[in-house]
Image (spheres, helix red, strand yellow):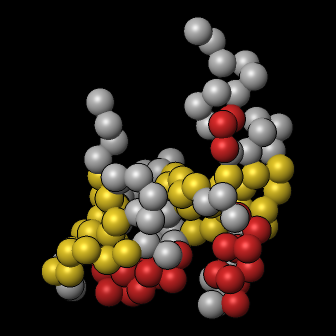
C-alpha cells in the first residue's frame, strides 16, 4: 500500500493555496475557490485542500513534510513571512523538526529524519 493523497479542510482555499505555495508545494489542480491539489517535490504523494463552511471541531491532524535542507528551508520561509511556533530543533527520536500552523490552524511539522524515519536504532524486525 502507498499513501496517495491527504486532503484537509479550509475556510479560504485561495489563501490556503498561497500559503502552501510558499512552503514549496507545486499546484497541479486549480478549482479555486473550492479545491486545489498540490504535488510534493519528492515522491508520489499529493496534497489537497477543499473548501468547508466550518472547520471540524476536533484536533489532532498533523502534516509532516520532509526536507533534507531543513534549516535553509525555514530561513527562506521566514523571509517570506511564515511564522514558526518552533524553529528547527533536534529531537530525542533522531529527527530535526520545525513546527508551524497553516491559516486554518492545521499543525505542520517540517522535518529531516533521513534513515531514522523508517529505520531508527530501535526498529523492530
Q: Is residue 32 above or below residue 69?
A: below
Residue 3 shown left or right of residue 122 in the figure: left
Q: Is residue 1 above or below residue 65?
A: above
Residue placed most toward the observer, 57 or 45: 45
Q: Is residue 28 above or below residue 33?
A: above
Q: Position of residue 107 (x, y in %)?
A: 55, 60
Q: Residue at x 35, y 53 (%)?
A: 45
Q: Position of residue 21 (x, y in %)?
A: 44, 81
Q: Position of residue 9 (x, y in %)?
A: 32, 65
Q: Quadrant of the C terminus?
A: top right
Q: Quadrant of the N terminus?
A: top left
Q: Residue at x 76, y 68 (%)?
A: 71
Q: Residue at x 47, y 51 (%)?
A: 61
Query: Which of the 4 quarters of the picture holds residue 88?
Result: bottom right
Query: Which of the 4 quarters of the picture holds residue 94?
Result: top right
Report whether residue 102 is seen: yes
Residue 18 shown left or right of residue 53 in the figure: right
Q: Residue at x 53, y 75 (%)?
A: 23
Residue most extreme to the bottom? 80
Residue placed most toward the observer, 52 or 14: 14
**Badge count:** 0
Query: Which of the 4 quarters of the picture holds residue 15?
Result: bottom left
Residue placed most toward the observer, 45 or 20: 45
Q: Position of residue 101 (x, y in %)?
A: 57, 69
Report whether residue 86 is seen: no
Amino acid at each position: 500500500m502507498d499513501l496517495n493523497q491527504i486532503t484537509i479542510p479550509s475556510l479560504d482555499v485561495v489563501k490556503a493555496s498561497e500559503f502552501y505555495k510558499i512552503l514549496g508545494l507545486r499546484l497541479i489542480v486549480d478549482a479555486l475557490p473550492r479545491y486545489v491539489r498540490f504535488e510534493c517535490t519528492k515522491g508520489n504523494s499529493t496534497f489537497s485542500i477543499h473548501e468547508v463552511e466550518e472547520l471540524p471541531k476536533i484536533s489532532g491532524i498533523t502534516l509532516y513534510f520532509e526536507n533534507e535542507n531543513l534549516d535553509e528551508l525555514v530561513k527562506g520561509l521566514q523571509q517570506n513571512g511564515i511564522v514558526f511556533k518552533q524553529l528547527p530543533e533536534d529531537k530525542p527520536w533522531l529527527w530535526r523538526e520545525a513546527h508551524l500552523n497553516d491559516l486554518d490552524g492545521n499543525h505542520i511539522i517540517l522535518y529531516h529524519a533521513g534513515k531514522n524515519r523508517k529505520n531508527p536504532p530501535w526498529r523492530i524486525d
